Image (tube, grey):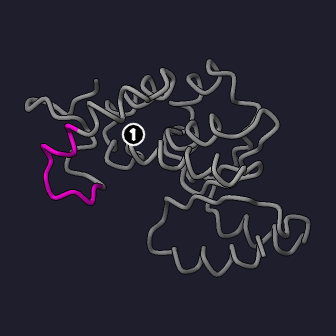
Amino acid sequence: MASNGENGRHQEVGHKSLLQSDALYQYILETSVYPREPEAMKELREITAKHPWNIMTTSADEGQFLSMLIKLINAKNTMEIGVFTGYSLLATAMALPDDGKILAMDINRENYEIGLPVIEKAGLAHKIEFREGPALPVLDQMIEDGKYHGTYDFIFVDADKDNYLNYLWTLTKTIT
């Protein structure tokens, strides 16, 4: 299990949780989340925990939640804005059918490439189209091209928090 240093707590503890108790959250991780985490996701979580910006990663429980949502709606074509090392991207790729696709966008390809060997080893790289750069210009071009209208079943936005309203506005034109 990944830890965040001297206190032995998991990197997820104290971050992105609605729970007020770190002890309760750690208990949930250890008894429910980590035992169900696929080996590839565990490997990528542990790699990402060593990254100096590891606070940006999707937590293990959030990854399982995303996976469940994708399976519940039978998503086939998805988009992810903000990839970092690819933990949520891996969760999505694992949840999609073999012919499923993910358009993944991030401003930093180097971080994506940290997780890419794990994604490749899991046999899921064929599902991912990665585009480096700011997402809004890509989305604007997609709208202008008109060929992506209504093609996405699920979109996960986890980047550039200041632009969330702009993403929402642009994405409603892309998917509706």
**How many numbered discs, if any?**
1
- Above-or-below relation of 107 to 30: below
- Between residue 39 and residue 135, name the one nearer to us: 39
Label 1, residues with CA under 10 Å away: few <14, some 14-19, many ≥20:
many
Q: Residue at x 57, y 32 (%)?
A: 113
Residue 25 lies in magenta, yes or no?
yes
Image quarter where the C terminus lies is bottom right
Please state the horizontal and vertical placement of residue 100, each as a whole percent of the image: 77, 41
- Above-or-below relation of 76 to 20: above
- Between residue 111 and residue 101, name the one nearer to us: 101
Q: Residue at x 63, y 56 (%)?
A: 133
Residue interval drawn in magenta: 17-27
Name the residue beneath numbered marker 1. Answer: 60
- Above-or-below relation of 18 to 44: below
Q: Is residue 38 left or right of residue 156?
A: left
Please state the horizontal and vertical placement of residue 137, each as a whole percent of the image: 70, 69
Please state the horizontal and vertical placement of residue 107, each as a whole percent of the image: 56, 53
- Above-or-below relation of 18 to 56: below
Q: In this view, does 20 lie to the left or right of 137?
A: left
Please state the horizontal and vertical placement of residue 62, each as a whole percent of the image: 42, 48
**Which kind of residue does numbered mark 1 sit on?**
Ala
Q: Which residue is drawn at 48% across and 48% down?
A: 65
Residue 76 lies in magenta, yes or no?
no
